[in-house]
Image (cartoon, grey):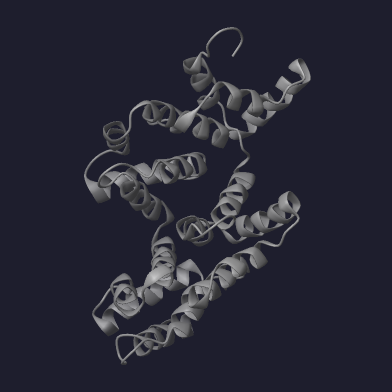
Amino acid sequence: MKGLGTDEDSIMKLLTSRSNSQRQQIKAAYKTLHGKDLVGDLQGELGGKFETLVVALMTPPTLYDVTSLRNAIKGAGTDEKVLIEILSSRTAQQVKDITAAYRQEYNKNLEDDVTGDTSGHFRRLLVILLQASRQQGVQEGNIETDAQTLFSAGERKFGTDEEQFITILGNRSAEHLRRVFAAYMKLAGYEMEESVKRETSGGLRDLLLAVVKCARSVPAYFAETLYNSMKGAGTDDQTLIRVMVSRSEVDMLDIRADYRRLFAKSLHSAIQVYTESLSLSVLNYTGIY
């Protein structure tokens, strides 16, 4: 960054070849050596999507989730997609860490901010997910009962009892839900996702679908999320960056495998086709390139 111009290629190669914890050490050492904030200097030198990506890379994982949620809530309107993605896919401990870090960072209660910006059944399920208190393991005696309850609350009746969907899908463990989904398929003749699409709508439908998909497979959920971010005219760069950065040290290899299985092409080639300068930096970072 010294002198005229910025060597973006060197910045990219250096930052993407280090883990997030190593980048935090680099940030601390930079301040000690130069008396300046590295992220502030990078923001002053870079711009556009590359700046957004680099700032994301320099942010600790929990704080990155916290910042993403805050940006989704504040201002006019709510970015429901971000709330759905983060709260449906993170582990119970991660949600607890996010809630604590949100209070520390903004001196606000995340649940209060979420409830103040959402409504109805959508809000109720978000609040349940924020409790991070899903049941553990599989309750063998409740598998058939839960499947029957879901069937009776939707396909079997006129109208939908959303509360039953919310209670079961929001509180049971992923292992238990996978067994319930199999029992539901035998009972109803439909996959759980099909019934959710038919029986619910709007934000609640999107959130329930995300919960169901994450119960089946979090990597497959993110493979589909990445596919949708690059589908159609233009790209959803914010989602593309957020998923690539947040999952790069978690389950990116599994996401890559699921992407190829689901869409018959590599994630690498998909990003190359749908992006320009952004692609190599992200791909290098995740070890795809």
Residue drawn at 51 percent across, 43 percent down: 246
Image quadrant in which you'd find residue 256: top left
Count of labels in the image: 0
**Residue that protrudes farthest toward the top in the picture:** 3
Quadrant where the image shows the N terminus: top right
Percent position (x, y) of residue 274?
29, 36
Q: Position of residue 103 (x, y in %)?
A: 73, 56
- Farthest residue toward the front? 76
Quadrant (top left, top right, bottom left, bottom right) of the C terminus: top left
> Which one is nearer the viewer's eye here, 203 or 170?
203
Q: Position of residue 196 (x, y in %)?
A: 34, 74
**Residue at image point 62% right, 50% down:** 66
Residue 155 vertical placement versus 238 (above, below): below
| Position of 287 relative to 85 (above/below) | above
Answer with left or right where residue 149 lies relative to residue 18: left
For residue 124, which quarter of the picture?
bottom right
User: Do we see residue 139 in this rendering?
Assistant: no
